[in-house]
Amino acid sequence: MNEISEQEKSERERIVVIDDEYAMRLSCRQILSKSGFEVETFEDGAKGLEGVAKLRPSLTIVDLKMPGMSGLEVIPRVHEIDPEIIIVVITGYATISTAVDAMKAGAYDFLPKPFRPDELRIIVNRGLERRRLKLESRRYEMERELLKRRFVSFVSHELKRPLAAVHQYLDVLRQLGDTEEARAKRRDWLDRCLQRTQDMKSLIDDWLTLAVLESGSLFRERVKVDLKDIILHTLETYETLAAESGVTLHAELPQDAYLVRGDTNCLGVLFDNLIANAIKYNRPEGRVTVSALVEDPEIVVAVQDTGVGIPEKYHEFLFDEFFRIKDGEKQVSGTGLGLPISKKIVSEMGGTIELESEVDVGSTFRVRLPAYTEETSAAEKTDSPE
């Protein structure tokens, strides 16, 4: 028989059994040890509580009827030590009344004696699974709160920097004379101030959009929308930026319409982010192509560029809030929120967004959205509250 290593032993979940019957303690130990648990047993409530305080088990099995301290007294005392410990009550005097009393005291479940080994294993595994889910949920909540604090700290820092720069520029400008050199410097520094304030505005706009998305209230309406109109309007908006960057814009939209059900403003934000990135991360004499097709039951829109591409090691982080590539690849201004916002919009509409990219060749973001149908529209209207 192979001995259990120290690492394996440390990873096993610990169970404490408190019962005044030796045969029951031995039986529980044998059944649960064979299932891979580390089991400790105690013969009365007082010793059991000492064991719980020392061992901090994941689950405790408590007999209700014991001399001295009863199981009903043990239950709340266990939760005073650790409220996350799952408690399973066992007793040979099972009644509805005792079960109710045990649940009120804080027990997770109730198992009458005598019981079969499989009954004990099932109830223990079910209790431990509940504990794991609860702890996992708490961990996610803590991570979410930490992310929020980092979010506020990051935004505050990003706003403070341009504000400080603008303040310095204006302070110097106020002291400049009226020479030709001073006028040239004034124009240059005013342009810098305008760029800094535009950066702040972009950050605030993205921050507010993300906050509204998190609250689930971004979609003010869900109406029939033609993606072709939105795409063409967005491309027209970015003609100047593309020309300044030496990038040409192309649309390949062979159909008359590409209909989805959604919010016009949200869809505008989505394609604004994707097309702006395709221009910013492109190269001189590069090209941005926006194409669309119908793949029933979806509309598929691809935004393709001939830019620097995205290394594969970054793909899994690309839609994380504030993530930006910072190891020598092309650097551009931005908040690091555009792609997370885009993904949230697509997800809210029941769609997906995919990335294909090759370094020094370019990237393609492919958006798949459910196509508009009269049946879907009628069903949503029926389900929505008056």
Image: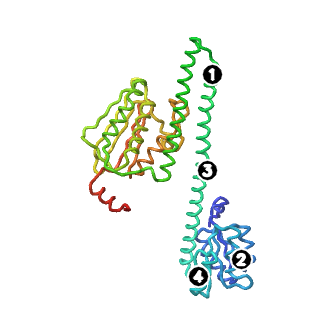
Marked residue nearer the N-terminal end (1 or 3): 3
Quadrant of the frame with the N terminus: bottom right
What secondary structure is marked by label 2?
strand
Q: Which residue is mark 1?
A: 174
Quarter of the image for residue 184 reads top right
Q: Mark 2 near mark 1, Cβ–Cβ under 8 Å?
A: no
Nearer the viewer's eye, disc 2 or disc 1? 1
Q: Which residue is mark 3?
A: 146
Quadrant of the frame with the C terminus: bottom left
Marked residue nearer the N-terminal end (3 or 4): 4
Marks 2 and 4, how far apart in space?
25 Å
What secondary structure is marked by label 3?
helix
* Side of 136 where 279 appears, left or right: left
Q: Which residue is mark 4?
A: 100
Marks 3 and 2, how far apart in space?
40 Å
What secondary structure is marked by label 4?
helix
Marks 1 and 3, how far apart in space?
42 Å
* Nearer to us in this view, 384 or 52: 384
Quarter of the image for residue 38 reads bottom right
Q: Which residue is mark 2?
A: 42
Quarter of the image for residue 31 reads bottom right
Q: Amino acid at mark 4?
A: Val
Q: Residue placed at 69% from the left, 75% from the top? A: 41
Marks 4 and 1, how far apart in space?
78 Å
- Classify 379 as above or below 77: above
Nearer the viewer's eye, disc 3 or disc 2? 3
**Residue 207 bears which disc, if any?**
none
Nearer the viewer's eye, disc 1 or disc 3? 1
Crowding at label 4, few (<14), some or many (≥20) Cα neighbours within 10 Å? Answer: few
Q: Amino acid at mark 3?
A: Leu
Marked residue nearer the N-terminal end (4 or 1): 4
What secondary structure is marked by label 1?
helix
